[in-house]
Amino acid sequence: MKAQVYTDMPLNELNDLLNSERAKLIKMKMSHSVSPLENPMQIKYLRKTVARIMTEVNRRNRLNSVKNG
């Protein structure tokens, strides 16, 4: 997904997506260590996806703290 998609999502959906993507990443890493994946680049893309989601969540948290503080 593009970063624009994450900016349009509500915060609770972003947190749910973050949890599911992190779980998927952990599962993928474990299965890759046991037997090689067909496409190991999927790990790289998933790691970047998690980073994009975390960036958006952190950006929103900073904005809320500035507004409230």
Image (cartoon, rainbow, N blue to C red):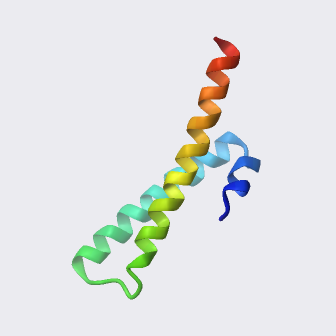
Q: Residue 5 location, x and y as percent?
A: 72, 57
View extreme (left): residue: 34
Q: In this view, does 64 lie to the left or right of 19?
A: right
**How many numbered badges does the structure rendering display?**
0
Q: Quadrant of residue 65?
A: top right
The image position of residue 26, as x and y in percent, is 36, 62
Q: Is residue 42 left or right of residue 68?
A: left
Residue nearest the viewer, comparing 64 with 29: 64
Name the image quarter holding the C terminus. Answer: top right
Report x, y in % for residue 60: 64, 34
Residue 24 shown left or right of residue 31 in the figure: right
Question: Which residue is more in the foreground, 13 or 6?
Answer: 6
Q: Residue furthest top?
A: 69
- Vertical placement of residue 63 versus 21, above or below: above
Q: Which residue is drawn at 45% across and 75% down?
A: 42
Quadrant assignment for the N terminus: bottom right
Which residue appears farthest toward the right when viewing the image?
Answer: 8
**Position above or below: 13 against 25:** above
> Image height check: is 34 above or below 66?
below
Residue for point 67% across, 62% down: 2
For the point 60% across and 27% down, which residue is it? 62
